[in-house]
Amino acid sequence: MAREALLAALSDGWADPARLYSAGRRAQQLSDAARAAFAEVLGVRPDEVSFWPSGTAAAQAAVLGALAGRARRGDTLVHSAIEHSAVLHAAARGKAIEVGVDRRGRLDLEAWERAVSGDGVALASLISASHEVGTVQPVAAAASYCDEAGVPLFVDAAQSVGRVDVPGGWSLLSASAHKWGGPPGVGVLAVRKGVRWISPYPQDDLYRPQAPGSVDLPAVVAAAASLRAVRAEAQTEGVRLSALVDRIRERVPMTVPDVEVVGDPVERLPHLVTFSCLYVDGEALLHALDRAGFAVSSGSSCTASTLRPSHVLEAMGVLSHGNVRVSLHSGTSEADVERFLTVLPGIVEGLRREAGM
Amino acid sequence: MDLVLDCRGLKCPLPIIRLAQRIGDVPVGGVVRLLADDPAAENDVQAWCRMKSQEYLGSPEKDVFEVRRTG
């Protein structure tokens, strides 16, 4: 679907939508149609939607732009301890208050309420669901505390859009096309009317959220088409994947000793499951699974460019070594999951034996 | 202090593996002092204690962690 839309848009949407010649106007129509499609899914007005070169760029524009827009009201960003590093890097630019999560990775709402109602808070930022452990965050409750405190809320919804609904009440929201199976290189940002935003970049109109330079319009068109397609099947696909995640959550502790399946077992994304195996090197486990044909991720320090353990696993206080994150997608079959569950115990046992355990 | 394990310079999970291999060397109620400078050690020592029902006593100084054998 995304591929077909991309190919069609490449022949029709190559021109600059800001130009007045006919090819430019055709491109503008495609851009408007994509904007309307995103607006419908996100429940906002089309002119509240802007396109960015990635989900990361959209999230950072949201944080930095909203902080700049509220500079007269305060200079502090309140954020959860489990935000994506895109947000944490933006947070590191200025003053920030971090709010913790519980063992299952769910936001501490009492601490959140205290933090957002403090003096000098310009913006609050909450990920819709943890990208590492899948725990869905209490966005509606967090939004109502922000509302009471008069603080705008930014929701990084990259993990949720296209899969599960995101509650309302937020002021800014970002999403990322390749997370829902669209093309890479498309981020979407919605900024509600009345939210003051000032561009962190040098550009013509500093007050209208818009990425500097041209966006990849064919990719944006493909992203809108793929979102429509994914949304149409989200319900049934969510049920299917969630059952497979349940199977992994149940079976792994039964067949692998000394393992901790992390994240909330119920309030979670449908497609993502994370567990940590004691005494196992995360990188070795990842490579062994790769040789067996499984592409998984890890939050263990040995797999990170920074050589630090995942900040999400640390915030939860769960084991960080021997960590595996399994993301299921539309191409994942029940047989794939069964084969994964069959090979995993032997792989873990072998690695432990090599380590002398 | 009943046993000191110097795991400085070792990457996780090696400090935790050493801790698990050697905690049986102290009597129940005995204390192991683990020296480990891997950035994951502080988090993972505590997680290990929770998973294996041992008592985490705390970190008296940087890169030092104390665990009481409970069983």
Image: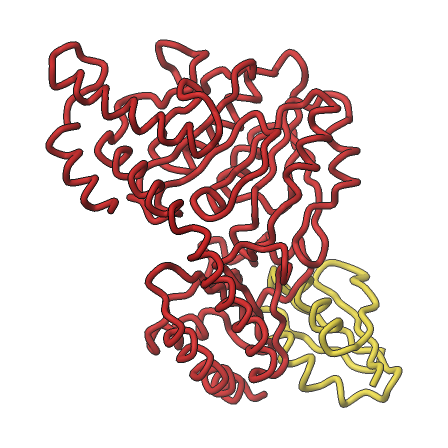
Chain colours: A red, B yellow
The quadrant of the rendering that contains the N terminus of chain B is bottom right
Q: Residue at x 61, y 60 (%)?
A: B39
The correct choice, above or below, for A38 with respect to A202 in the image is below
How many labels, in total?
A: 0
Q: Quadrant of the C terminus of chain B?
A: bottom right
Q: Is residue A150 visible?
A: yes
Residue A290: percent from the left, percent from the top? 35, 72
Residue A334 located left or right of residue A170 = left
- Residue B33's place in the image compared with A53, above or below, is below
Displayed quadrant of residue A224: top left
Image x and y of residue A283, in percent: 45, 69
Indicate the position of residue B2 as horizontal and vertical percent values: 83, 82
In this rendering, is residue B70 above or below A269? Answer: below
Q: Position of residue A179 (x, y in %)?
A: 39, 47
Q: Residue at x 68, y 82 (%)?
A: B20
Question: Is residue B65 rendered to the left or right of residue A7?
Answer: right
> Is residue B49 rendered to the left or right of residue A69?
right
Which residue ends up furthest to the right in the rendered image?
Answer: B29
Compared to residue A96, the image places residue A355 above or below, namely below
Is residue B11 visible to us here?
no
Residue at the image point whose x is 41% and y is 33% from the top:
A57
Residue A127, image quadrant: top right
